[in-house]
Amino acid sequence: MYIPDHFKNDDTGSMLAHIKKDAFGSLTTCTPDGPFTTHIPVLHVSDDTEYGKIIGHMASENDQTNHFDYGTALAVFLGPHAYISPNYYKSGTGVPTWNYIAVHAYGALREVKGEEKLRQQVLMTEYFERAFETPWTISAFPEKAIEQMLDALISFEMRVERLEGKWKLSQNVFEEDRQGVKEAFDSSSCQQEQAVGKMIE
């Protein structure tokens, strides 16, 4: 990913926090026919490595599952983003652009099988159900239904080997223009623009 120095985020903690909060990424792998991307929910899990791992699953009929070992995989997590109008700039100079944050995670994919596969599904379900007053659990399923569910899925983990973070938040313009962008977004009725505004210091 192209990242000018003024947009570069080297803070591992904030990048991993974004992955865990967003929890929905675009997973791209190489295949003999070119890149292949699947858009899926995932979960970041911390362990004794620097960046931890990303776990998830996809339909067993998804052809991407046949190319897990075909080079390094890329998971992209896009955060809040919004269009920037030159009208926001108090200096009266500038051009149209876009503000956004993005995190790229790189690593090798490994298929997860057996009891580990079931444990992974339980872990992901518990995480995504945590906000409900009465969380749904896999144990509510009959054993046969659980087996059928697992057979229909290919579970994986990606050991994260490298992270890139880009926080493009008008750092490259005059301070008065940066504040003009923030003021426009803070007063906007658009949730995306409000989210970007909160990230502009």
Image (cartoon, helix red, strand yellow):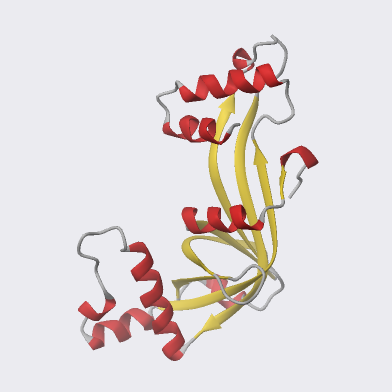
As drawn, 30 above or below 182? below
4 horizontally vs 186: left or right = right
Outermost residue on the top side: it is 92
Picture layout, residue 193 above or below residue 124: above
Percent position (x, y) of residue 120? 43, 78
Nearer to the camera, 17 or 81? 17
Quarter residue 135 falls in: bottom left
Question: Residue 182's spot in the image, x, y percent?
Answer: 56, 24
In x, y percent, where is residue 181? 59, 22
Q: Quadrant of the C terminus?
A: top right
Residue depicted at x 59% and y 32%: 200
Relative to 41, does residue 83 appear above or below in the rendering?
Answer: above
Numbered-mark total: 0
Q: Residue at x 65, y 23 (%)?
A: 178
Question: In which image quadrant can residue 145 be found?
Answer: bottom left
Q: Viewer-proximal residue, 58 or 9?
A: 9
Task: Report the residue that reaches farthest toward the bottom.
Answer: 114
Image point 76% across, 38% down: which residue? 6
Q: Position of residue 40 (x, y in %)?
A: 47, 61
Q: In the displayed image of the protein, which residue is found farthest to the right?
A: 5
